Image (tube, rainbow, N blue to C red):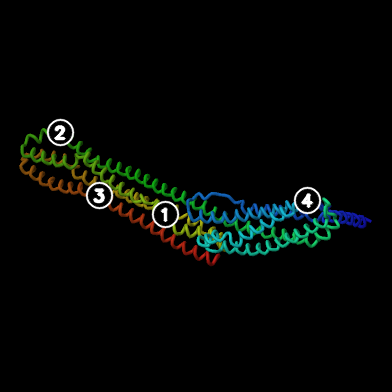
């Protein structure tokens, strides 16, 4: 019982759908096709035409401005936009004219059908010969992948337009004959309409419009993917230029930070060398307070000690000169170092231009592997700049570690110089204790004169060491920077080859 009820319900639903299908398939005819006659199918033709019109609008719907300044992108975009606009405009004219004609019942027949035929001829001329300049531009700038796709779609559409032109001509003949057969009557009877505007005639125009509708999506695809690739390339180029400038600023900031660190090192070295002056001041003050009076009682000893004190003063009491020498040495060093990357922006442009252009070329050519290759290598090329920044940071870091070792060397040399005068007061005091100073004074003078000669050599070596080490540090930095740039060039050249291989072979 339940099963039979379900069967009755099912039959009722199916019957309802069948009735609805009949009503849709055989809707009440309306006066159409530019004559006042009830012709079935005109509304369908109009609907199909308007749907096709929307597709043609989509062909020309991609609008953007090239921002990167790369003229090749601008030229390709201009050529492609011209192609899209002309096809879109002509296609819209055809479909709108067909829709208008399909729902018109007042004529004139010639006016409505001429507008369709003229629009069809216009689009035929465009896709057969009117875009040769733009297609040549595409072939010259991005190879022939895009033009080949367009050529394929144009050949198909040409056949469709020929069929559409014939269907329109047949419909025009049919409605003209029907209108003439009706004589002076303002309307065309259904009998006359069916006699001339046959189901075959209506089906032909319907199928031709439907076929045209099926030809447009591939054009939408070609235009959108091509212009989309150009837009992606433009955005990528703008982004990578910003990235390069950012990394130039980063490297400059690394140089500024390095300069600050070196100046801190200079401050430390100057602090260490001031201990020489401090030791000298302590020595002279102690001598004046405890020994000077005794020493002056003996002319020979006084002569020797005064001479030695003068020598010590020359070596140890020149803090201003020492500080100035250190400042000048490192100021010259930093000036040379910070000039090493003055041309970094130019270097990035010359070293990375080829690989970036090649990557963008693969993308905008829209070949079979374009998107894959761009996705595979786009970020890797982007990363070259930050990797070079890391290499530059390592160069600076290595030199700072060497300055730390130099600081230790400076401290040791200064300490050795201080050792040379540590016992001076003690030995002079002992000399004053001798009853016979004639033997002590010459010995003291000879020994300390020799010792202070070595002290002078240590002082000279200290400044030579700072000069030679800053020169060596500059050369090491120059070599390190050159090596990092060389590696960047090699990596870019290697990736260029990989991009070419990817374009030809695709995934490996």
| Residue pointed to by mark 3 | 467
- How far separated are the C-alphas under marks 2 and 1? 69 Å
Mark nearer the viewer, 2 or 1? 1
Mark nearest the camera among 4 and 2 is 4
- Provide the residue designation for mark 4: 105
Badge 1 density bin: few <14, some 14–19, many ≥20, Cα 10 Å = few
Mark before the other along the chain sequence, 3 or 2: 2
Q: How many marks?
A: 4
Kindly identify which numbered label has been placed on residue 90.
Answer: none
Is mark 3 in CB contact (under 8 Å) with mark 4?
no
Say if residue 252 shows up in the picture: yes
Mark 3 / mark 4, whichever is N-terminal: 4
Left or right of residue 480, residue 198 in this image: right
Looking at marks 4 and 1 on the same chain, the residue that comes earlier in the sequence is marked by 4
Element at label 3: helix
Dot 4, how many residues are within 10 Å of its Cα: few (below 14), some (14-19), or many (20+)? Answer: some
Q: Nearer the viewer, residue 414 or 216?
A: 216
64 or 474: nearer the viewer: 64
Q: CA distance from mark 3 to mark 1?
A: 35 Å
- Provide the secondary structure element on which disc 2 rests: helix
Q: Which residue is mark 1?
A: 349
- In front of the other: 324 or 425: 324
Q: Pointer 2 and pointer 1: residues touching (CB < 8 Å)?
A: no
Q: Is residue 372 visible?
A: no
Instruction: Please give the label number shown on residue 288.
Output: 2
Q: Left or right: where does residue 153 sit relative to residue 332?
A: right
Residue 472 in percent (x, y) is at 28, 53
Tell which of 204 and 152 is nearer to you: 204
Q: SS at mark 4?
A: loop
Image location of residue 186, percent across then percent down: 82, 50
The residue furthest right is 1
């Amino acid at each position: 019982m339940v099963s039979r009820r379900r069967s009755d319900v099912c039959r009722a639903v199916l019957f309802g759908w069948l009735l609805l299908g009949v009503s849709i398939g055989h809707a009440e005819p309306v006066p159409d096709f530019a004559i006042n006659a009830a012709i079935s199918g005109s509304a369908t033709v109009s609907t199909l035409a308007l749907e096709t019109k929307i597709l043609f609008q989509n062909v020309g719907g991609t609008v953007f401005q090239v921002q990167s300044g790369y003229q090749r992108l601008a030229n390709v975009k201009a050529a492609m936009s011209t192609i899209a606009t002309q096809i879109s405009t002509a296609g819209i004219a055809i479909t709108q004219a067909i829709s208008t004609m399909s729902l018109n019942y007042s004529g004139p027949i010639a006016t409505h059908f001429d507008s369709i035929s003229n629009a069809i001829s216009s689009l035929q001329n465009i896709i057969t010969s009117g875009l040769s300049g733009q297609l040549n531009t595409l072939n010259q700038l991005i190879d022939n992948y895009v033009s080949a796709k367009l050529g394929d779609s144009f050949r198909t559409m040409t056949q469709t337009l020929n069929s559409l032109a014939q269907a329109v001509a047949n419909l025009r003949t049919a409605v003209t004959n029907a209108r003439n057969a009706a004589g002076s009557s303002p309307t065309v009877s259904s009998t006359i309409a069916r006699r001339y505007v046959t189901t075959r005639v209506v089906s032909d125009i319907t199928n031709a419009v439907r076929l045209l509708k099926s030809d447009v999506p591939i054009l939408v695809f070609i235009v959108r993917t091509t212009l989309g690739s150009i837009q992606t390339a433009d955005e990528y180029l703008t982004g990578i230029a910003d990235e390069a400038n950012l990394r130039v600023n980063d490297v400059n900031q690394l140089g500024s930070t390095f300069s600050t660190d070196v100046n801190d090192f200079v401050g430390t070295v100057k602090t260490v060398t001031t201990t020489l002056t401090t030791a000298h001041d302590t020595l002279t003050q102690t001598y004046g307070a405890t020994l000077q009076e005794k020493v002056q009682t003996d002319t020979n000893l006084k002569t020797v000690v005064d001479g030695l004190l003068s020598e010590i003063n020359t070596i140890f009491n020149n803090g201003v000169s020492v500080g100035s020498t250190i400042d000048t040495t490192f100021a010259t060093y930093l000036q040379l170092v910070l000039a090493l990357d003055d041309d970094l922006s130019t270097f990035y442009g010359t070293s990375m231009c080829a690989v970036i252009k090649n990557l963008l070329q693969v993308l905008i050519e829209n070949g079979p592997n374009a998107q894959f290759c761009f996705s595979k290598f786009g970020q890797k090329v982007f990363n070259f700049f930050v990797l070079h920044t890391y290499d530059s940071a390592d160069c600076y870091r290595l030199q700072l570690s060497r300055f730390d070792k130099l600081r230790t060397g400076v401290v040791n040399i200064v300490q050795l110089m201080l050792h040379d005068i540590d016992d001076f007061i003690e030995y002079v005091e002992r000399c004053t204790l001798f009853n016979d100073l004639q033997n002590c004074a010459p010995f003291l003078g000879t020994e300390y004169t020799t010792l202070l000669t070595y002290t002078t050599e240590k002082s000279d070596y200290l400044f030579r060491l700072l000069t030679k080490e800053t020169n060596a540090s500059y050369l090491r930095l120059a070599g390190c920077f050159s090596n990092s740039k060389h590696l960047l060039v090699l990596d870019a050249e290697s990736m260029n080859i990989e991009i070419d291989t990817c374009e030809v072979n695709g995934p490996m």
